[in-house]
Image: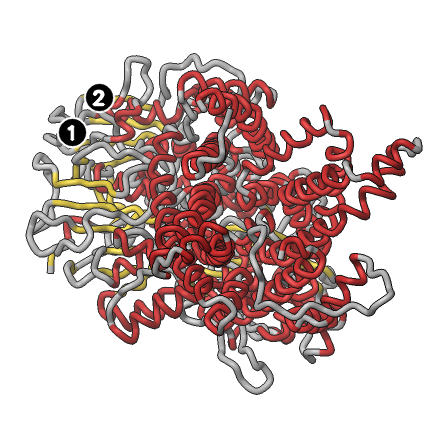
Amino acid sequence: MRVTKGAQIVAGTALLALAVAACGGGATEGGNTAAGGSDTPVRMELGEPQELLVPTNTTESEGAEALAAVFEPLVNYDENKKAVEAAAESITSDDQKVWTIKLKAGNTWHNGEPVIAQNYVDAWNYAANQDNAQSAGYFFGRVDGFADLNPGEGKTVTAKGMKGLEAIDDTTLKVTLAAPFSQFKTLLGYTAFYPLPKAAFGPDGKVTQEFGEKPIGQGLFKLDKPYKKGTDQTIDLSVYDGYKGPKPKGWTKLQFKLYTSAETSFNDLQAENLDIHDSLPPSAIATAKTALGERYQDQPDAGIGYIGVPLQYNPEFKNADVRKAISMAIDRKTIAETVFSGTRAPADDFINPAIDGYRQGACAACAYNPAEAKKLYETAKGPAKLELGYNADGGHKEWIEAVANNLRANLGVEVTPKPFEKFQAILDELDAKKYTGLFRMGWAIDYPSAENYLTPIFGTGAIKTGSNYGGYSSKEFDDLLAKGDQAATPEEGLKFYQQADDILNKELPYIPVYFYRNNSGYSTKVKNVKINLLNQVEWSQVEKA
Amino acid sequence: MSDIQQPAQTLPPNAPSGPPLPRSTKKEGKPASLWSDAWHDLRRRPIFIVSAILIAVLVVMALWPSLFTAIDPNDPRTCELATARQGPSGGHIFGRDNLGCDVYARSIYGAANSLLIGISTTLATSLIGGMFGLAAGYFGGVTDTLASRLTEIFFAIPSILGALLIAATFRGGPLSSITLVIIALTVLGWPMTYRIMRAAVITAKSQDFVVAAKALGAGHMRIMMRHLLPNALAPVIVIATINLGGFIAAEAALSFLGVGVTSPDISWGLMISDARNRFLDAPLPLIFPAVFLSITVLAFIMLGDAVRDALDPKLR
Amino acid sequence: MGRYIIRRLIQAIPVLLGATLLIFAIVFALPGDPVAALAGEKRTDPTIVAILRERYHLNDPLLLQYWYYISGVIFRGDFGVTFADVPVSQLMAGKFQVTLNLALTALVFEAIIGVGLGLWAALRRGRAADTMILASTLLLISVPTLVTGFVLQLVLGVKVKQWTGVDIFPIAGISNGFRSYLLPGFVLAGISIAYLTRLTRTSLVETLRADYIRTATAKGLSRRRVIGRHGLRNALIPLVTYLGADLGNLMGGAVITETIFNLPGIGNQLFQSVYLREQPVVVGIVTVLVLIYIVANLVVDMMYAVLDPRIRYE
């Protein structure tokens, strides 16, 4: 399943996986070789990365998964969903505004050069500079001086870099933010924050095509040969001897096999032509449970699916009771079980259970109550006709139709599901006031903090620049977020964020419908497969069975 | 070959379509026109009778679907998500689909759109291809060269990919999904009729009665409409009936690819597309509309076969 | 002959240009911004969009864009790059290989089954076997690929595996090498098999009526020899040309089969590229398919001349 970070959530249904996931296809090599010996690779399922393998230009799940094997992030996330130092020795701040990142000494790039703080500065400035048109640029929006690298369309960038970014010495990086942000450390585990070696840049200062095909990282694995996108059906890697962190026991080779459809890859998993599959499609779940038994895993995934409400465009939804009534008329449990076969869980909060801060049942109006819904809808005089917009490229049709049937049957209203080519088309029509109906919306986190479910989607500031497509705006909510950002510790910040979350649960600016689940399976040839918060396999823990 | 290629292909010119049948005996004394002769011939062909009955049933199904089922699939209350993908049971003889809706009722209601698209596309391609073919065949020269080059361009583009592109491009616009399918199929389908018409007109043009009409000073319009058209019509009708089934199959293919008919409209291709993800667990919601689709296409292709044999004895 | 080929090739130029321009224009009209389509569900940053649009010439008028494209193809053999900076030719090479494998498998099925059944029917003309074969070809023509694909996938792919425990016909992907193409190849061949059966039957029946066959029989040659030496040889001409022309049709029409069986071929790729608004890929694939169509037709006409000495091209 391909997920665009911070944004697009694409259900892994077969046809649509085809439509969206770029090409690829089953690998012809590496067929039936047993994974017994230490030389045979561990084979991992992957969709084709959307772009070349450049961290600063990778914001979707498949490319990120490949890069995660090649690079070591500054922080990892432990079992308690907390950020812990990995490539960083320490990450500290007194005022939540100026952050000092100490790097572990002695780490080297795959070409043997030492990893230095300047590598981070180079990479981050490169990502943030609008001239480079890197998709991960927005991650640096909080860094002081980001605006200098992004003067806007048609304007020339004059600044060399962000003024908030400074390499004090080879192992010390100082980051000054434009405003305090208590969650900054949690951001740093993401693809966008990987460093880039000197060798990545060509004479023109741009990351080279050669690097994109064979990235030089500082992580556990290095690429054996360049990956020719569009042609190659595998990405082959082996353990980098100079890597200082934990290494897997008993095996050294990793192979990503590229698939266009989750069905094909599931077949290969069953045939033991594939060892690890971390995005099983709904259609495979029943079979996977019986066929794989213990080797089937199901764990929370940080994504959320909503029904978006166009508050700023359509006054019919102004009354919160209308939104609550719609919410109560949706039978989330049956949808999760039947449409998604358990690859989703019914949503009951605006914060996902995978993330610290989730509270079970926090959204009272998320419980299914058709009788109450109908009463509430009638007294609140909800509109007699509803439209449900969705993007037809993402496998959303079925659950949207199911929701439409729920609303028709339980509220007695006319509901028209309306397919759009792309999610962007919904936004365009909302902006142009051509479409004023409800719309589907999904959110995959940019960084694992409760705050990420709030500010970018519901903050007033996000109406113009972020993902607040409905245009919800509440001063009380914004104030609580600001308090959370400035809190002395992440824990203290969370308290404010949860208060902000309470407001959302009361007002329902969007209607949360489901939480994503991560459904994975592995072959008999491997064991101890752990999948982390970012849906990436913890390679050092995987063992051969 | 894909479904949509079908319309672009006639049967090989002299492929026999069935066991030799006894020729109809004509009543003496009456001069039999091509048409009455053909009708006489048709009536006695079992293949025609079977296809005509099937088509009659389909037309009734399309016009009055409620005669066949008490369930109205447009009413959401007939769907029950919790019962999704359940097999056949008392009230639901074909079982339920992924959203818990009745497969039988939806299959019945799907007939209308398939027929609508098949018939409209056939009419449109016949009209456009026929007109161009008539003009090109009659005038010859530059008109003919230009029109023929143009059709070559369309022939060179694989039909299903071309239709896919057109349908995908103009989706979400002011046109309904059904209109769009008709247009996409027509754009890729008309050159076939063009070729047939042109060839027929060129043959007819050199015949004595046309030469005579010209000598008598008849205008272009009159010659084309009164003399050429009636004589060139038979092969166009043959190709039209054969293509009709192909267009119905093509609609299903486009809907299956997600660029054809869209919900809440019902179509067999759409049902097949919707049932696809769970096909291996629950094949019935896919199989039933597929059977309806196949029978419909079969009926029209059989009809086309019979009409060809009757109208075009040369091709037998 | 040489001059004929050159003339045909020159005639093909307007067809090629016309077809690619037509496709280019349609793709140009595709709704939604190709750059925005890359952005997923994030509201796109107008600055980045502007820079990318500039880079890929998306702000230029249609004809100018077309010129950039077609001149690259003609003068440098360069089909452009995708929005991920992957050369389109590199992308297409792998996909065409898959579709070619599929089409060739289909062609083999067609040749063996179609010609075989056609011969059988012709030799048993008017008898039960003939009637049966003709009836089943009608059925084969009528059942859409969409339906045969799924039904065979279920029956031959899944059920056979359940009953026998052996995965004889893989139902998805190409990871099983040659075997992966068996089922989809047969499905793709379906309708063509029916046409070829009919064509073979007619062709042989016609040939067997010819004078020289009668002469051969009269000479006292054995039936086997008459049919084998004289009948078949001449009946084969239209079949070979049909097969030749069909290769192009099969490749262009494989999208449904590729979708059902999850084969990463060109049909599949085109389908995705339409969604991603990848103009260079869409136009590139169609251009190559048009070329295949043109060349296949030319080759077929040449084959006529080679196989049938009566035909001469000047």
Q: Position of residue A131 (x, y in %)?
A: 43, 20
Image colouring: secondary structure
State the residue lying farthest toward the front: C219
State the residue lying farthest toward the bottom: B90
Can see residue A345? Answer: no
Q: Position of residue B289 (x, y in %)?
A: 56, 68
Assign a secondary structure to mark 2: helix
Assign a secondary structure to mark 1: loop
| Labels 2 and 1 touching (C-beta < 8 A) | yes
Residue at image coords 60%, 20%: C63
Which residue occupies the foreground of this view, A151 or C52? C52
Q: Position of residue B178 (x, y in %)?
A: 68, 53
Residue pointed to by mark 1: A109
Residue at image coords 10%, 45%: A252
Q: Between marks 2 and 1, how big is the CA–CA gap?
A: 10 Å
**Disc 2 marks which amino acid?**
Ala
Residue at image coords 58%, 27%: C18
Q: Is residue A325 above or below residue A183?
A: below
The answer for which chain carries disc 2 is: A
**Disc 1 marks which amino acid?**
Trp
Label 1 Cα neighbours within 10 Å, binned few <14 / some 14-19 / many ≥20:
many
Can see residue A202? Answer: yes
User: Position of B294 compared to A520: left or right?
Assistant: right
Residue A199's disc number: 2
Label 2 Cα neighbours within 10 Å, binned few <14 / some 14-19 / many ≥20:
some
Residue at image coords 41%, 64%: C120
